[in-house]
Image (cartoon, grey):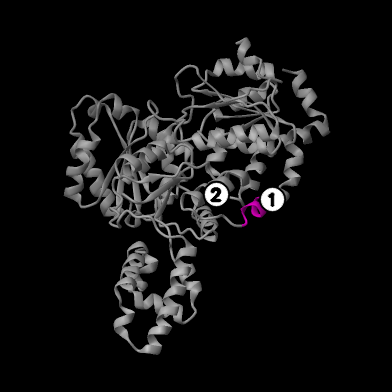
Amino acid sequence: MTKNLSLKGQKLEKLTFECETGNYHTFCPISCVAWLYQKIEDSFFLVVGTKTCGYFLQNALGVMIFAEPRYAMAELEEGDISAQLSDSKELKRLCLQIKQDRNPSVIVWIGTCTTEIIKMDLEGMAPKLEAEIGIPIVVARANGLDYAFTQGEDTVLAAMAHRCPENHLPAFVLPNKTQTLAFASEAKGKSERDKQTNEKSKFKSTSVETGAFWLAKQLVTESFNKLNSFESVASLAKQKDLEKIESLQTHPPLVLFGSLPATVATQLSLELKKQGITVSGWLPSQRYTELPSVGEGVYVCGVNPFLSRTATTLMRRRKCKLIGAPFPIGPDGTRAWVEKICSVFEIQPQGLEERESTIWKGLEDYLQLIQGKSVFFMGDNLLEVSLARFLIRCGMIVYEIGIPYMDKRFQAAELSLLEQTCNKMNVPIPRIVEKPDNYNQIQRIRELQPDLVITGMAHCNPLEARGITTKWSVEFTFAQIHGFTNARDILELVTRPLRRIQSLETLGWTKLVKSNI
């Protein structure tokens, strides 16, 4: 205990990892249904569990009496658990009813703790039932025994990665924009010379034909279908329409994975487009029928730190190439994310430094509020490392980063950026505690007295009653926090309880509250 409490005022030279209880003190992962059914518009989610799971979903998702969400509960009764009923027949009945009422493009079965305990073979039943009813059935395990809060999405996306169509493009290295324009200029000059001599045979000489085949083969993308011959490239060059050639995708296919609101996904895609990078697709897509093509030669990059199983599936099973980048949370993280993708495609990023600087200037009013304040992460949604890195860059001191699960390989770039940020800001590098013991954390919080504790909803009221200012970590899960423009939303959430305390101090209420504790 003494070792943990000595963090205040101590400067650690490198990252320190610990693991305490081995238990998940987090929200239930079946709550991923809340944002996934809205993201995948033609889907239907069927949660297989007990009445407790149904009560949780009703309360957590805020279902109104007139709402008609695209998810339902397949409740396991005593008859099911004692094997008096056939699981397959009951699920078939429910799926047929779903097909009749909603006719979705895909039905996602979400397994809960109960299905794990009674060894319910959802993966075995799904293919047979899928063939009978004619609707794809994706099975995802989102139980609280094996997964933390946000990892429910990870299991769903990992299951969907198997359903993505195969990419049939050859594995090759594409030329950059400069090479493409140089080739186009060469084609223009060659075309003019051929027109003057009127010798079509020379236009299709061996060397040029080889160059045409090289360009066509390496620019086989949807945006390049119109340029399926050397003549069309020469025609563009002849018309001095080099802007069209500039807009062509001159890099391998890039697929981003992670569920984000459509507006945020568009923002990130546009940031990459400014650098000449085209996003081939998102996993998940807004419609199941529009899943992106993946396979050998396709590059993938995640936008959330809790998608390690999806990344592993895409790499090992679908043979994709993973871009290990920090996550686009905060101006610093977004810039590092874009720069990493550009470096993989050998593209020199343009204007990112100015873009980040402009965003920081727009955050000055919030930065003044949190400058020098301290924060303690108890751990809940696996966004803790990224948020801590951003808040350190904003001038806050992070005493401890509690996190339910840490995949050091998938978060390697994020951890490296955290270390660089701490050294740049000349502050102690926080200790990272995986699966923390809540009792020990409370003792450390009492000793350190942080200005803010970001934790799960279960701990907020008890901490507030003891005079500790808190913030629900689940709010960061549902808020729009990715990209340059959403950095203000993160600080709005962080500073809200601090501003509330300032207002109470002005009225003299906080002293009265603390005196009664």
Q: Is residue 353 magenta?
A: yes
What residue is drawn where x is 37% and y is 64%?
219
Which residue position is annotated with label 1?
357
Kindly identify the amino acid type of the residue bearing the numbered disc 2.
Answer: Glu
Tell me where residue 420 appears, x and y as whole percent: 61, 35
Which residue position is annotated with label 2?
339
Looking at the rendered image, the quarter that the C terminus falls into is: top right
What residue is drawn where x is 35% and y is 46%?
320
What residue is drawn where x is 42% and y is 60%?
175
Q: Is residue 191 magenta?
A: no
Looking at the rendered image, the quarter that the N terminus falls into is: top right
The foreground one among 393 and 400 is 393
Tell me where residue 398 appears, x and y as whole percent: 65, 28
Horizontally, residue 368 falls left or right of residue 485, namely right
User: Element type at marker 1?
Assistant: helix
Q: In this view, does 373 lie above or below 481?
A: above
Tell me if residue 236 can be seen.
Answer: no
Kindly identify the amino acid type of the residue bearing the numbered disc 1.
Answer: Ser
Tell me where residue 500 appears, x and y as whole percent: 73, 36
Task: Specify start and end residues of the magenta stretch as a single range.
Answer: 351-359
User: Element type at marker 2?
Assistant: helix
Horizontally, residue 500 falls left or right of residue 12, namely right
Secondary structure mostly seen in magenta is helix
